[in-house]
Image: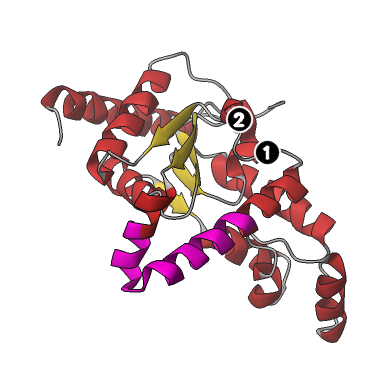
Amino acid sequence: MRFPLTEKLIQRQINHWSRLRELIHEQPAAAEPEAGPVITISRLAGSGGRSLAANLRDRLGMTLQDHSIVESIARTRRLNPELVALLDEQDIRQSDLWVRGVLENRLFLKEQYFNALTETIEEMAMPGNVVFLGRGAGHVLGHRASLRVRLVASMCTRQERVQEQLKTSRAEARALLDETDKRREAYIRKLFGVDPHEPSHYDLVVNTDRLSAADVLEVVVLATLSHARREPKQLVGTA
């Protein structure tokens, strides 16, 4: 459900961001202010993260970065995308990655991936007006992000959603959720050394059990607008 006042605020802020981008292009390159919001989305599987990211893209005219992060790393490092994808939100053993790299005559170790991931996310975030889905973007950017969102939901709700989306059995849905949650948690813990379930890592944690995708979008949009009304800050410096 959309609210007229919210729609007016959104349009006003989008016009403001557009004007900021015009001013940036008119001025010499320097420490540039944000030309739009930078939102990061962390999520439990089946809690609605992808829907939220797509809805933010469409509602606020943002750029969505998800698998494109991996594609960018592979392209700029001249690597096989499949090799880089081995580390995309997954916990792979260093020895396995080393063997794969040797076989392809192009090593790409976990430390290199971390550096490439950090550089890529920071570069993509610099112009503003972007929403990141997963990949630890919130941990890379920290407080430099406009809003760090975490979506959660009960296992029961998530199972029902996955069953409906994939037309699979309850047992298969549960197995898929368990595996995905385990893989993503290990990825964050090993790459960033933090607990992805810790609420203090996020600005907004939303339980989507009883909220529709439209409701969740409204909550996040309002939080984004609230942040945007504060004094713009530079997307540089220490997190």
For badge 2, the amino acid type reads His
Does 235 sit above or below residue 117? Answer: above
> Magenta residues, as a range?
160-182
Q: Which of the two residues, 114 or 234, is positioned nearer the viewer here?
A: 114
Q: Secondary structure at mark 1?
A: loop
Magenta stretch: residue 232 in it?
no
Query: Which image quadrant is residue 154 in?
Result: top left
Residue 207 percent across, percent down from the top left: 39, 36
Q: Which residue is mark 1?
A: 195
Give the residue at x 35% y 50%.
157
Give the residue at x 36% y 72%.
169
Cα distance, mark 2 to mark 1? 9 Å
> Mark 1 packing: few (<14 Cα in 10 Å), some, or many (20+)?
few
Determine whether, in the image, residue 223 is placed left or right of residue 25.
Answer: left
Does 56 sit above or below residue 90? Answer: above
Q: Which residue is mark 2?
A: 201
Indicate which label's residue lies in the foreground, 2 or 1.
Answer: 1
Query: Which image quadrant is residue 217 in?
Result: top left
Mark 2 vs 1: CB contact within 8 A? yes
Q: Earlier in the sequence, mark 2 or mark 1?
A: 1
Q: Which of the two residues, 90 or 147, is positioned nearer the viewer here?
A: 90
Residue 131 percent across, percent down from the top left: 45, 44
Q: Which of the two residues, 138 or 205, is positioned nearer the viewer here?
A: 205
Residue 4 percent across, percent down from the top left: 11, 26
